[in-house]
Image (spheres, grey):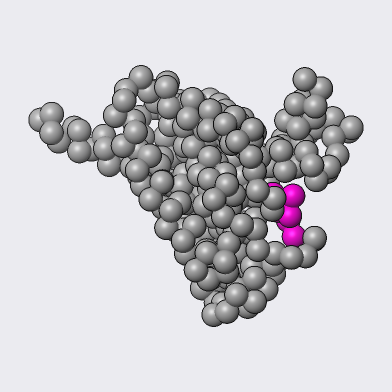
Amino acid sequence: MRKQIEIFFTALMFYTRIPCPKWVTHDPEYLNKATRYFPLMGWLVAAVCALVYMGTEFFLGSSIAVLLSMIAGILTTGAFHEDGFADVCDAFGGGWTKEKTLDIMKDSRIGAYGAIGIMLLLLLKFTTLSAMPFTQMWMILLAAHSFSRLCAVSVVATSQYVRENDDAKAKPLAKSITAKEIIPAVLFGLLPLLFFQRIEIIYALILPLLGTFFLRRYFHKWIGGYTGDCLGATQQVAEVLFYLSLLAYWKIEFILLQ
């Protein structure tokens, strides 16, 4: 139990900006095992976003509440995944070889592709969430944040890490993960879907899964695997695609019932 607590807090320290006990370290072994708790970190981030949204929607309106909840989520993770998405946009937009792509991805500066990409992604996320019903927002956020992180875990489980240097941000995730890490990740990633109490919620998983499959193939084609930034981009894309899938399903269902 002590070891699991240490692994959990290691995941909390690595994937969020939530304060952790001082005895938590960057032990590579624990960081690799912490992958099992990646979707669980989505529960915590979603809880923060949902609390901010539900606490401000009545006083400020839906649009402002959605924006504040997005800001809260970004502050909770330190823009960890958004940064990865922007880096991927820059790297694959401006790199024409594996070496050049990896070099651009490692550059801390943001370029035109990254700036435009993250702007459009956040705008799409804001617009989609603004169209969601208030009463189900907490379920939507919980399911989206956890399942999108599970999508990133699936890339780790089915692909290979491509950087050779030890100073990369996600080097501890480079090792292949075992069933012992995958099974908890799957449970944490899928359990929030039960709150919807409708089997039709599986339709909301189609686009995120297709998006993850496409991104994995695209990364493999150009760089032979994934990096930490690729995982961040996968999480962000899968999250937005979950919102879009759910909204599209509800719109279609509404039309068919008329």
Q: Is residue 132 magenta?
A: no
Residue numbers of the magenta segment: 168-173
Q: Is residue 50 left or right of residue 20?
A: left
- Compare residues 9 and 134 and report the one nearer the observer: 9
Q: Is residue 172 magenta?
A: yes
Residue 230 in view, yes or no: yes
- Compare residues 134 and 220 and report the one nearer the observer: 220
Q: Is residue 81 left or right of residue 132?
A: right
Q: How many marks?
A: 0
- Give percent across and percent down for residue 15: 68, 42
The part of the image, by quadrant, that contains residue 52 is top right
Residue lying farthest to the right in this orientation: 23
Image point (53%, 71%), residue name: 222
- Give percent across and percent down for residue 124: 41, 51
105 above or below 237?
Answer: below
- Give percent across and percent down for residue 183: 57, 31
206 above or below 200?
Answer: below
Q: Is residue 194 left or right of residue 252?
A: right
The part of the image, by quadrant, that contains residue 63 is top left
Image point (88%, 33%), residue name: 22
- Give percent across and percent down for residue 104: 64, 72
